[in-house]
């Protein structure tokens, strides 16, 4: 199964749509992940004796590697089969990381402005009742 990654601009546009859809529905989750992209690449490491005898050779990379950024709306398996699950990803090259994350942060901030703070008062009241019962007995 070959993964097709969006361009950086298409990814940010898709992320805006995901955040807007979650906001319109009144609830939902958006999962964002970032990690080093190494699939299909060979990473060159610098030989360094301080890397614990080669236990962690990828700590001493000779050149920067791209990162992969993913976003999904968190729909489960049933929704995925119905086509409601959205998964988008992009590869960010090392020389584009600073500009990309500036725009990425702006998109995330914009998407979080309309969110309400989670109501935890019900959960807290339930704990207080338990504690009260224990003190009496």
Image: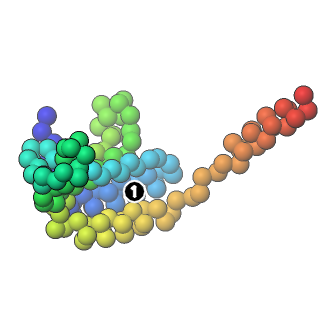
Work out which quarter of the rendered image holds the C terminus and state it: top right
Q: Residue at x 51, y 51 (%)?
A: 26
**Is residue 40 visible in this depiction of the protein?**
yes
Q: Residue at x 14, y 44 (%)?
A: 39
* Residue annotated with mark 1: 19
Q: Residue at x 91, y 32 (%)?
A: 136
Work out which quarter of the rendered image holds the N terminus and state it: top left
Name the side, left or right, on which 108 lies relative to 2: right
Number of other residues with Cα within 10 Å of mark 1, as a class: few under 14, some 14 to 19, many 20 or more: some
Relative image position of residue 106 (x, y in whole percent): 37, 69
Name the side, left or right, on which 48 lies relative to 83: left
Give the SS element for disc 1.
helix
Relative image position of residue 93 (x, y in whole percent): 16, 61
Q: Residue at x 27, y 50 (%)?
A: 35
- Tally of numbered tags: 1
The vertical placement of 127 against 13, above or below, is: above
Q: Nearer the viewer, residue 108 or 64?
A: 64
**Is residue 68 visible in this depiction of the protein?**
no
């Amino acid at each position: 199964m070959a993964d097709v990654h969006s361009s950086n601009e298409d990814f940010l546009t898709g992320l805006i749509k995901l955040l807007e859809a979650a906001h319109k529905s009144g609830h939902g989750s958006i999962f964002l992940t970032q990690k080093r992209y190494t699939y299909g690449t060979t990473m060159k490491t610098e030989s360094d004796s301080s890397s614990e005898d080669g236990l962690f050779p990828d700590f001493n990379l000779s050149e920067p590697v791209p990162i992969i950024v993913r976003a999904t709306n968190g729909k489960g398996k049933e929704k995925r089969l119905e086509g409601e699950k959205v998964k988008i990803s992009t590869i960010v090259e090392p020389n584009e990381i600073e500009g990309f994350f500036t725009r990425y942060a702006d998109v995330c901030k914009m998407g979080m402005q309309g969110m309400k703070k989670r109501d935890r008062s019900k959960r807290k009241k339930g704990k207080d009742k338990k504690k009260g019962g224990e003190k009496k007995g």
